[in-house]
Amino acid sequence: MGSRGEAGQRTAGRRWRGLRALQSGPTAGLGLLLLPVLIYFLALYAYPLIGMLQRSFRDPATASLTLQYYEKLLNTPAVLRVFAGTFRLATTVTLVALVLGYPVAYLLSKLPRRTAGLLMILVLLPFWTSILVRSYSWMVILGRAGIVNSILQGLGIVSEPLKLMYNSFGVHIGMVHILLPFMILALYSVMQAIDRDLVKSAQSLGATPLQAFLRIFLPLSLPGIGSGCLLVFIQALGFYITPALLGGTSDRTISMAIDLYVNTVINWEFGAAIALVLFVVTFALFLIYNRILGLDRLFGG
């Protein structure tokens, strides 16, 4: 009896170890697959971020901790105006992208999946061209001798070229063109999952198409609006190339200010302080969005 009991225990032990191996095998394999991504993230994101954090709190003369760069930031009106202008620019670009992108996403969501997929290629087409090339293209279109001014002058609408570039108008045109696909994709991912029978049921109960849209469809699409606005707004906060090429002296952004202090003034500590403030604001926006809607909605959850 004793030998049988020992044999049973050994068999049960082997089964338990086999079960643990099956459970830990996929997890270990997944960990190995994620290891290169983790190393990449630590090397190219975490390490520079930690270095920036250290520089913003370090006095290069004494190598001691200091808050002088943040005090300087708060006491430098020019930098504060750049922050205010960047947030104003990001807000208006986000609103324009929402106004233009919502009808497009709505129409795409009403079409059959195959047709919508083919038309979505046109939305994704700008991603195949770099931001620099697209910004230079708008310089050709909006310049004094560009396509728009040539057409307007040829039709006799204007007698002299309009100033469509090196101002806020040109910056908004370029940034909306670049960021609009993000808004459309975020809206479409939510709209195509909305049950259209709900809208039809509201209309069958006496609601007009406008009432059904405002009371049924629009509230259900709010997660898409939130995620699209978050994606566009955060990317607009960090834009550099398009405002630098299409904007004027009054259209400087936070990224341009960081570049100025790092590469021209050679004040890395102050530039790091500005960059860290931008990072904190961006992270705070993510936290607010997560608190209200949840980050899973940002990725179509």
Image (cartoon, helix red, strand yellow):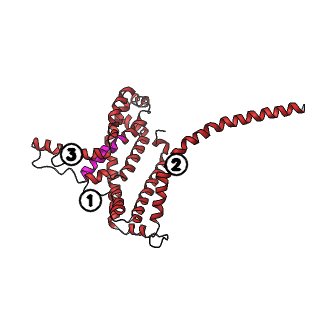
Spot the residue most to the right. Answer: 1
The kind of residue on which mark 3 rests is: Val
The kind of residue on which mark 1 rests is: Ser
Q: Can residue 51 be seen in this view?
A: yes
Name which residue lies at 24% across and 44% down.
Answer: 137
Please name the predominant secondary structure of the magenta segment in the image. Answer: helix
**Picture coordinates of residue 3 (x, y %)?**
88, 32
Q: Say which quarter of the image contains residue 27.
A: top right
Q: Do the residues labelled 1 and 2 touch (CB within 8 Å)?
A: no
- Where disc 2 sits, the SS reads helix
Q: For mark 3, what is the residue?
A: 140
Gap between marks 1 and 2 measured at Cα: 40 Å
**Picture coordinates of residue 119 (x, y %)?**
33, 31
Gap between marks 3 and 2 measured at Cα: 42 Å
Residue closer to the observer: 153 or 60: 60
Name which residue lies at 42% across and 68% down.
Answer: 69
Q: In this view, does 262 lie to the left or right of 251?
A: right
Q: For mark 1, what is the residue?
A: 250
What's the magenta region? 165-181
Q: In this view, does 225 lie to the left or right of 138?
A: right
The kind of residue on which mark 2 rests is: Ile
Q: Is residue 48 left or right of residue 238?
A: right
Q: Tag 1: Cα neighbours inside 10 Å, few (<14), some, or many (≥20)?
A: few
Asked if the magenta segment contains residue 172, the reply would be: yes
Residue closer to the observer: 223 or 175: 175
Q: For mark 2, what is the residue?
A: 39
Q: Which of marks 1 and 2 is nearer the N terminus?
A: 2
